[in-house]
Image (spheres, helix red, strand yellow):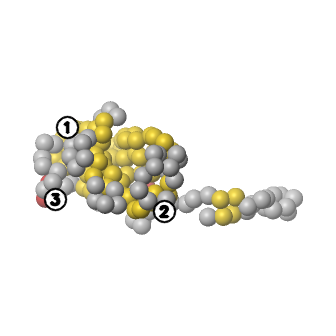
Amino acid sequence: MEYRARGLDGIWSAPATGEIQVSAVTVADGFDPLLAVQSQPQFNLSTYRPGERLYFDVQVKGSIGVYDKYDVYAAILFPDATLFSFGYPDQIHPLGELKPYRTQLNVTGERSFNILDIPLPSLPAGDYQGCSLITPADSDPWQSNNWTHIACRGFRMD
């Protein structure tokens, strides 16, 4: 978005460019109050170029009183459907392996996990998805009936 600001003296500033990111979901803080356990992937930009810094965070929120244990997954899906998942701390799992970022997690309240904080190398142009997945601890993440919550957020690589 390009914008200008007008000072109290009535003079307009030079044009500046900024970005506004809005979730399509209209719930408090990006979370659905009806779900007991959920996650939200977040990025600092919606479009990247090589060399720009990518911040990939996952927020996890659970209702107070939910004491079950969960596994939390974080992954990036490339335009060609290649999947890379991430582990704690600072692990990139082999291509196509879906391993948890954190295991046996008690999800009460809200927590934020910094998954990636890197300058981007040259990657294929296209649309990517950053996803977070929550499953009951030790369950098979490839079986969708084990998914407690899944959320994805797209970004573009130019």
Q: Are marks 2 and 1 in contact (CB under 8 Å)?
A: no
Q: Give the left or right position of residue 137, taking residue 34 as reference.
A: left
Residue, disc 1: 104
The answer to whether residue 40 of the structure is visible from this angle is: no
- Amino acid beneath label 3: Ser
Residue at position x 44%, y 59% from top?
125
Between marks 3 and 1, how big is the CA–CA gap? 19 Å
Q: Which residue is mark 3?
A: 144
Density class for disc 3 (Cα within 10 Å; few <14, some 14-19, many ≥20) is few
Disc 2 from disc 1: Cα separation: 31 Å
Q: CA distance from mark 3 to mark 2?
A: 27 Å
Kindly state the secondary structure of the residue where label 2 is placed.
loop
Q: Amino acid at mark 1?
A: Gln
Q: Nearer the viewer, residue 78 or 123?
A: 123
Image coordinates for residue 151, horizontal then vertical, percent: 31, 57
> Mark 3 or 2 closer to N-term?
2
Q: Earlier in the sequence, mark 2 or mark 1?
A: 2
Residue 61: image x %, image y %? 33, 48
Q: Which image quarter: residue 7?
A: bottom right
Q: Is residue 106 left or right of residue 57?
A: left
The residue under label 2 is 22
Dot 1 alpha-carbon crowd within 10 angstroms: few under 14, some 14 to 19, many 20 or more = some
The residue sitting at 34% across, 34% down in the picture is 90
- Image quadrant containing the N terminus: bottom right
The disc at residue 122 is none
